[in-house]
Amino acid sequence: MKIDELLSRESLLKTKMGKAFLCDRVVFRGKDLHNELGELDWFSLYFFSITGRILNANELKLMNYFWVSTSYPDPSIWPNHICALAGSARSTPSLSLMAGMSVSEASIYGRRPERKAIDFFYRAGKALESGSTIEMYVDEQLALKKIIYGYGRPLARIDERVPHTLKLVEELGLSKGKHLTIALDVYRYLKATKGLSMNIAAIDAALAADVGLTPEEYQLFMSPCFIAGMVPCYLDAKEKPEGGFFPIKCSSIIGETKVRRSW
């Protein structure tokens, strides 16, 4: 940004998102928060904050299930162990939950694979429209990137969330979407040629694309989705003796490297 542009913003805030006029009203994406949006549930408001759109009833049930189906209160997985460790160290709820959320953008789970998965489906849709086939496009992507996010699953052979999500999608009449169809076709090809299963990242990303979310919007939407599973882990660790979450004796640490660090 040039200096003239910076100076023009020194005493002026321009925004199309919202403003709190205290003692009067709150404008939220051009609407009155209390008079026009006050009857929304929080989930719908969160979606509106990201997209400026209101979900229809079936889309709301579907997107809500993305969060519900991934709420695992297991302190040994995902960001849950970070949150539990913070609780064991007697950190506050806010700091513990945020610490857990901060590691949800991992390389093999969470936000980064999800964003790459939805981007893949958008690109696949365009490739098919240009005359490519699923087989051609998948082979091309594997040659370039060695991986297609949403297929295969770290630590497990199958993803227990997939059949439940597909059942709900069928019940809601959302099973014929363009990108979901692509996701299932990719699965059938990878299963036949590579023996790979499909995990929930592929299904959710494809459905999000059918709802019309951009990769950025999808990442924002999914960012808090582990919270409901993290809270029980925090509480469980907080109720137990301080420092009692997976303590490790020095003698239990096995190191095989012979490289000495300079420090």
Image (cartoon, helix red, strand yellow):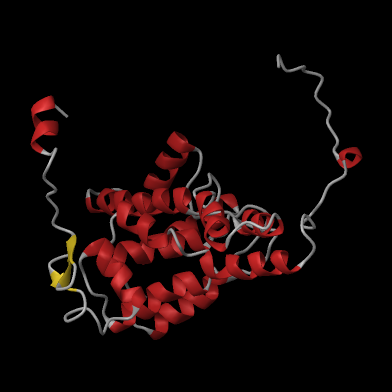
**In this view of the protein, can residue 89 be seen by the observer?**
yes
Number of labelled discs? 0
Q: Image quadrant for the C terminus?
A: top right
Observer-nearest residue: 49 or 168?
A: 49
Is residue 109 rendered to the left or right of residue 53?
right
Is residue 22 rendered to the left or right of residue 40?
left
Observer-nearest residue: 230 or 163?
A: 230
Q: Pinpoint residue 119: horizontal percent, then vertical percent.
A: 34, 50
Observer-nearest residue: 9 or 153?
A: 9
Residue found at x 29% / y 61%: 213
Q: Pinpoint residue 245: horizontal percent, then vertical percent.
A: 76, 57
Observer-nearest residue: 27 or 131?
A: 27
Residue found at x 18% / y 59%: 17
Q: Is residue 61 above or below residue 134?
A: below
Q: Pinpoint residue 77: horizontal percent, then vertical percent.
A: 66, 58
Which residue in the rendered view is the most extreme toward the top? 262
Q: Image quadrant for the N terminus?
A: top left
